[in-house]
Image: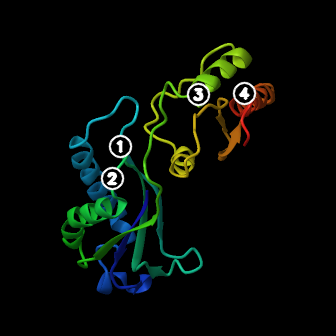
Amino acid sequence: AYLRVRVRRSWDAALARAAVAPDGGLARHAGAVADAIEAWRAGYLSTLRARGQTAAEVAIGALHSGSPEKPDLLPGLLEVFVYAVLLPGEDPARVARDLAAFVTPRIARLPGAPRTDVEVYASAPGGTADPESDVVRLTTAAWTAQMGKTAPVKGWSGATDGAVFLARGIPTARAGVRVTRDPNDPRVETVSLDELVRAARAYTEVALRFFGGRSS
């Protein structure tokens, strides 16, 4: 689930900070808002038990406040975007309500008594692939044949794409090439062309073997 935490207080003129917002305004307290969300995360995860590799996880993925075109204004809106990996059967709306109930009174204690609301702006039901299923077995075999090693995904509690496919009844296994980041621009992903070619062969083999002999 993708959750948006909105925190609001008045917009104020930066030149009048000493009079209208001596505390520095809303953006000045973004760290306290993030800390409140992190405190909720710790409590939420402590109530859940991992199911093998399937586990819940929560992380702050983005923050937005103010306007680069108008930095002369102290922002009246702070948005924190939270990515939540939810266990199968969990209701994203319930999680959003739980998060809101936890952070709202804590954020309200900040200078200016900011108001808070939390919404789910995208979600997919959680699910898992049977480790003994055809798609997992075929993917493991094809990946081993092409890459010379199996393709376990460790340290990941979930995958957005996998959840979307599983929710639509599409058998899903996750395997992919190693990705590194450009040191000059971390937004740019770098991969080996040789690995990409071998991965394409593995994906093709899985598709051919999975659908081989089937009317679909």
| 44 to the left or right of 67 | left
Residue placed under numbered mark 3 in the picture? 134
Q: Nearer the viewer, residue 44 or 203?
A: 203
Please report whichever mark, 3 or 4, sits nearer to the chain's N-terminal start.
Answer: 3
The earlier-in-sequence mark between 1 and 4 is: 1
| Gap in angstroms between the C-alphas marked 1 and 3 | 26 Å
> How far separated are the C-alphas under marks 4 and 2?
34 Å
Q: Earlier in the sequence, mark 3 or mark 2?
A: 2
Residue marked by disc 1: 56
Q: What's the image's color scheme?
A: rainbow
Query: Of circles 3 and 2, which is in front?
Result: 3
| Mark 4 residue type | Arg
Contact between marks 2 and 1 (CB within 8 A): the answer is yes
Dot 2 falls on a residue whose secondary structure is loop
Q: CA distance from mark 1 to mark 4?
A: 33 Å
Marks 2 and 1 sit apart, C-alpha to C-alpha, by: 10 Å
Residue drawn at x 30%, y 86% as measured from the top left: 19
Front residue of 23 and 60? 60
Residue shown at the point (26%, 36%) measured from the top left: 49
Depth order, front residue of 177/17: 177
Q: Amino acid at mark 2?
A: Glu
Residue 18: image x %, image y %? 32, 82
Q: Amino acid at mark 1?
A: Ala
N-terminal label among 1 and 3: 1
Place of residue 115 in the rendered image (x, y in percent of width and height, measured from the top left):
28, 77
Q: Which residue is mark 4?
A: 209
Task: Look at mark 2 in the image and give the residue it sits on.
Answer: 90
Asked whether disc 3 touches disc 2, contact meaning CB atoms under 8 Å apart, the reply is: no
